[in-house]
Amino acid sequence: MSELSMKECEVCRFGAPQVTEEETQKLMLEIPDWKVVKVDGINRLRRTFEFPNFIEAIAYTNKVGEISEEEGHHPAILTEWGKVTVTWWTHKIKGLHNNDFIMAAKTDQLL
Amino acid sequence: MSELSMKECEVCRFGAPQVTEEETQKLMLEIPDWKVVKVDGINRLRRTFEFPNFIEAIAYTNKVGEISEEEGHHPAILTEWGKVTVTWWTHKIKGLHNNDFIMAAKTDQLL
């Protein structure tokens, strides 16, 4: 279990700083299966998880939903037959916060 | 309850015809809150449903999952805080089949 996945989200306020490029590179080492994608000008963390059918995919969606409720931080979860694509970013700062990396690591641990 | 929502999906084989433009216009009258969107060259039906929180959104995602398993036809379901975007299309024919309109109508009935 990665150290990152054991951390808890901190309260993120409007105006909190986004992670720097240098911090991002360091954090990505702990979640190597995720990619930074830019959508609508906003950096986000994204990973697609594969499953043998729809039922297992939606079960994973629910697990991601549970941890997001626990931490009070919610991703976009795209559920399809055999795959779930999870995208984390922080709405309040329109970009990536340390919390997003923590949640990505926690998402990995659900597998 | 719309007539369309009470129909069942028929088996869709590779090479089955897509709905025509004329059929689409007629069917859209029964699901007026849906839009036809073209993504990666493929016509799809899409609607976003709004909810007051994440828990109700993911509960709806699960309901959509249940009917898709029942009918053996699966959409893409994007779950976010306060909204769920459902997209129906038929992979086998890379476009819209009558089944997609039936499933869109069934999705509406879940509200």
Image: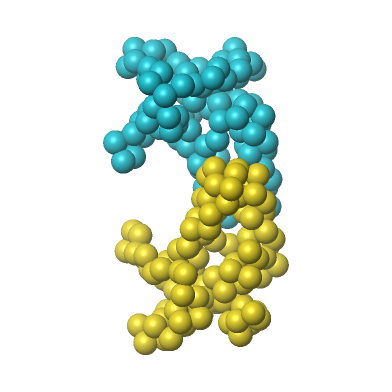
Chain colours: A yellow, B cyan
Instruction: Please tell me which residue is depicted at 43% across the width and 86% down the height of the picture.
Output: A26
Residue that appears at 37% across and 87% down: A22
User: Where is residue A38, by image quadrant?
Assistant: bottom left
Identify which residue, B1 or A3, lies in the foreground.
A3
- Looking at the image, residue A9 lies above or below residue B99: below
For the question of whether residue B54 can be seen, the reply is no
Residue B2's place in the image compared with A104, above or below, is above
Quadrant containing the N terminus of chain A in the rendered view:
bottom right
Rendered residue at 49%/25% (across/down) = B100
Establish if A103 lies above or below B98: below
Relative image position of residue A31 (x, y in whole percent): 50, 75
The reply, left or right, for residue B24 in relation to residue B81 is left
Q: Quadrant location of residue B65?
A: top right
Q: Is residue B87 left or right of residue B81?
A: left
Residue B73 x, y percent position in the rendering = 56, 30
Residue B102 on image: x %, y %: 54, 21
The residue sitting at 40% across, 32% down in the picture is: B44
